[in-house]
Amino acid sequence: MSRPLILWFRQDLRLHDNPALQAALTDASRIIPIYIHDDTTAWVAGAASRWWLHHSLTALADKLKQLGSRLIIRDGQSTEVLQQLINETGADTVYCNRVYEPAGLKRDKQLRRQLNENGITFSVYQGNLLREPDTVRNLSGQPYKVFTPFYKCYLREGWDNHVYPAPKQLPGVATRIKSKKIADLDLLPTIGWDSGFNDHWQPGEAGAWKRLSRFLRNDLADYHQARDVPSQQGTSRLSPHLHFGEISVRAILGELDRQDRRRQGTSFIRELIWRDFAYSVLFHFPHTTDKPFDQRFNHVKWKTSKKLLQAWQQGRTGYPLVDAGMRELWQTGYMHNRVRMIVASFLTKNGMVHWKKGAEWFWDTLVDADLAANSMNWQWVAGCGVDAAPYFRIFNPVTQSQKFDKNGLYIRRWVPELAKLPNKYIHEPWKAPEEVQQQAECIIGKDYPEPIIDLKATREAALEIYKKQITGK
């Protein structure tokens, strides 16, 4: 009898278009699917991500069971757990799909060496991006640092469009192989702050396909314009499904092709390639999770205002659009993309709080917290990353609110104490006369905070700091 093969699930919690799974089915008659919860690595998943992971693993385990297999759940240091399972089962092969976080790449390199020395095959497949980061370089052989030429390279050179079907049946797993219960991983919060998540999300592969189907049916045609309006469901909201690998980018593009809608989806495809760009940046410049890409920003003297940071986290800054975004984040584990840029600019530029403080909060509270995207996007807003917004670009939350939430629909939903204010004052409630505040049952300074900082003064101060410390003038 042939020796079993270990199929190691990581950020690929799906059966459809899973290259490692497809290879395993081709090469082995006995397959042991395993998920290892490893809290010993850097950037351990935040609370919102852990909530998602619990439900995503549950969905995967249920699907494997339906097909005749079983998901083995274990926790601990990944290398040690794999070696223990190899010793238990006599497996001589480990298959998985590649991850790109610096700690994961380092671990996989060491693991390959260790397993190969013991005669164990360790095969890694590309299942989470359109292209491997190391295959996308400019004419000088250097990684791209600006998105537009990176994007044009993708359009010019293309990518592998092949999509693997999901299996209809899987081989069984011996009962003697022990597994923890998913609940044993303690991924769910002990305090019910996540109570609203279920109203907004369905983690798992089936949920990912439902989300894609809804987006293509209802929102793709208007995506280019609607994606900037936070009160509308204009974006795909596929980011958490993509992060956990419940659906592949190739499968999404394959569905666009199947419906003959690739041309209609040009703006959406650009955002999917932006995701690949983030992983390319992380792959080539791994230090950007903690340090600025632009080294001139090493000298910026950031402020340590606990009061401002806490008000920002709680959605109590006195700026309605900022507060609406932060409350949406807390209640749903998600924030509209344009609002993410606005709240990040408010914290790092008006507030001069280090971008890492914001990145850490997003990491803990976003269900789609992704190290590549989170790091690059925060540095982009702060002005210190690749292809970054210039230091003098500071989003004004009032004018942004007036432009993209004209009637205050988004604000009224997430900051209900402002709901009765007329449109004239919804973006700047502190300007409302006392009589209007009383009629709206919202007294500024009592029912809703006054602005915690002055936008004009802090903008001017930030520009002076940036100009002096970055340009040296």
Image (cartoon, rainbow, N blue to C red):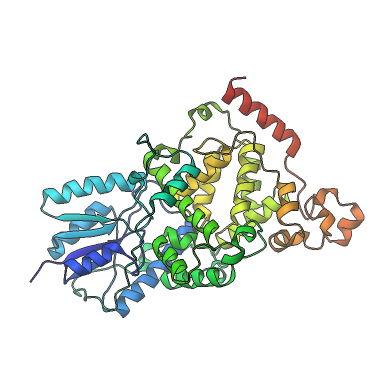
Q: In which quadrant is the C terminus drawn? A: top right
Which residue in the rendered view is the most extreme toward the top? 473
Image quarter of residue 411: bottom right
Percent from the top left, x then y, of residue 394? 66, 39
Q: In which quadrant is the N terminus drawn? A: bottom left
* Front in this rendered view, residue 448 or 271: 271
Is 376 left or right of 403, judged from the image as shown?
Answer: left
Q: Is residue 351 visible?
A: no
Percent from the top left, x then y, of residue 282? 41, 43
Is 347 left or right of 171, judged from the image as shown?
Answer: right
Count how many numbered circles sit on residues in the image: 0
149 lies above or below 329: above
* Front in this rendered view, residue 125 or 456: 125
Q: Is residue 115 visible?
A: yes
Image quarter of residue 20: bottom left
Is 164 left or right of 293, judged from the image as shown?
Answer: left
Percent from the top left, x then y, of residue 267? 55, 56
